[in-house]
Amino acid sequence: MPLLLDRRMLLAFGAAAALPLSAPRAQPAPAASAADSAFDALAAAWLEANLRLSPITATLWGDHRYDDRLDDLSLAGWSARRDSAAAFLTGLTAIVPAELSRERQVDAAILRNSLAGEVWSHDTLQAQRWDPLIYQSSVGSALYGLIARDFAPLPQRLASATSRMSGFPGLLAQVRESLAPARTPKIHAQTVSGQNAGLESLVDLLLAEAGALDAQGQAELRAAAGVAKVAIAEHQAWIDGVLVPQAAGEWRLGADLYDAKLAFALDSPLSRTEIKVAAEEALAQVRAEMYDIARQVLVAGDAPPTPPKPTADQEQAAIAAALELVYADRATPETLIATAQAKLDAAIEFVAANPIVTPPTEPVQLVLTPEFQRGVAVAYCDPPGPLDRELPTFYKLSPIPEDWSAEQAESFLREYNNWTLEGLTVHEGTPGHYLQLAISNRHPSVLRSILWSGSFVEGWACYAQDVMVEAGHRDGHPLYRLANLKFLLRVITNAILDIGVHVEGWDEARAMHLMTHDAFQQEREAAGKWTRARVSSAQLPTYFVGWREHWSLRREAEARAGAAFDMKAYHDELLGYGSPPVRVSRQLMFDLPVG
């Protein structure tokens, strides 16, 4: 049976570690020049403008002056944010990078890429006209950001939620006015239909806490909740009655848009062609290593043949047979979340006991992904904002949907078996995203904590999975390494898939063959990734690009240090730079020119 949820499980399944408050944020170095002072003033003004223009973002980042307000999601609101970015970009170009101190050169380069990307996205990509998912994230976060973390007394947060819910009719009307149904891709409209239905559960979460308010506050909360539910229902009717039927937009970006978006996403000189060639080479290499492990673990009399030099069919059959041993060790729908919790606890203990990296003291919790965020990824890490650093990081995991058949649930559990769940928990938890982002949030530059590099962050989490295998996690069991390599196939094929569907015109059959045959993914995982590839773009390659860059940097550091190389010291130094692009981390580590 699918996992049945109660409302408290939506917020937190359990605390993986009741840890002390986080280490204090270091202070930035004093300005050493007029250029430094000018940049500091510009960066502070940029932060303040973003907080003011997007109250929902301000809440998520940890500034709570605007918790009772909502964003302006009208086209005029989008234009105001675009014009603000353009103005700051103009101001930034007046500052000569060579006159900045080294740390500020890094921040200036990161900010420049972000501002230019924001202007390009508004003017050229124009997602505000055709992508309902960017709105859905804002609308859901308006409430979830107030209830998920205890950044202020509950009555204060409920009062802010009351104000925001009262504004839902106007907010959702802005969404409908901004979107052009004929430009909206069908898959985006269908995905947002399911997510919007989950908004009502957030309203119910707030209503369940009404007892924390006095009589007047309770009455106001209930009235606002009623207004919000009516608005959500009206919006659902529009999605299902107008947006979905009329959606006729093209979800494929095409080469020009894709290449431009990829350049902003990676902040790297790597081209799409270079990425694809490297990914295809890595795919063959990883499959060869998986075959070598298959030769070790396939000992049963009915196992397929494993000759030293297999044919393509022999390699495929042997790896598939070995993976059956991995799939056999799996949870049930009822024990999935508890199993993930146990693995998170164990990973935290392992990192603390081994010379891998200095663990953070910030708390982490495994939570169920809220309904309004489901349908795109199975799991992800949700850290606190850089201004709310003492609050917990959430490792979010989606439960098995209640409307899935037994066969679909079985497919999911085979994919997310206990060995793979180990790697997923390392990736999202520790020493992956939770650990890395907790350390990144301590960086003296708030700007760098906010504008992290996707390829650094995703690449680190993939690299961290390898490091745990290297360090002997799970006693070096070959099935753990095999599952790790299968996960790595997913990382590699993410990049190939994204390029294939958005630029090369791949259809579903070709995409599914890559995932289910070449990367051995189960049908449910592949089907979910097919959806994700269509509703997102230029994000899936960040895993492979970042993983490859992290390993390249590690090998260079080992070569430079020789026998003196210390993995823990290396990781501590690397993570201490925050989350800039890996190429920038290399420049900082080896005292090279920043650029």
Image: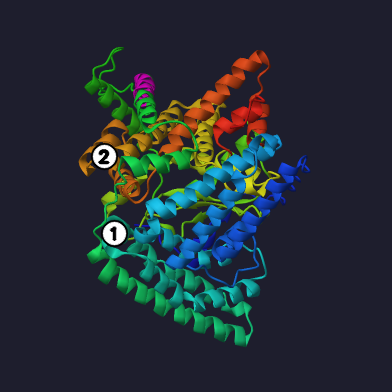
On the image, the x and y values in percent for residue 397 come to 46, 52
Q: Nearer the viewer, residue 93 or 423?
A: 93
Q: Which mark is residue 530?
A: none
Up-down relation of residue 564 to residue 463 (above or below): above
On the image, the x and y values in percent for residue 567 come to 63, 25
Q: How many residues crowd around disc 1 within 10 Å: few (fewer than 14), some, or many (20 or more)?
A: some
Residue 426 visible in image? yes
Residue 578 visible in image? no
Which quarter of the figure has residue 45? bottom right
**Could you tell me which residue is drawn at 65 percent across and 73 percent down?**
156
**Could you tell me which residue is drawn at 30 percent across and 46 percent down?**
530
Where's the C terminus, which quadrant? top right
- Bounds of the magenta span? 283-295
Q: Which mark is residue 511?
A: 2
Cβ–Cβ below 8 Å for labels 2 and 1?
no
Viewed as shown, does residue 258 lie left or right of 549? left
Q: Nearer the viewer, residue 12 or 162?
A: 162
Callout 1 secondary element:
helix
**Three-letter amino acid code at the position of disc 1:** Arg
Which quarter of the figure has residue 487? top left
**Three-letter amino acid code at the position of disc 2:** Ala
Mark 2 or mark 1, earlier in chain: 1
On the image, the x and y values in percent for residue 158 come to 59, 74
Colouring style: rainbow
As drawn, which residue projects farthest toward the top? 308
Which quarter of the figure has residue 198? bottom left
Viewed as shown, does residue 127 lie left or right of 144? left
Disc 2 to disc 1, how far (Cα)? 24 Å
Callout 2 secondary element:
helix
Where's the N terminus, which quadrant? bottom left
**Could you tell me which residue is drawn at 66 percent across and 23 percent down?**
566
Q: Which residue is mark 1?
A: 183
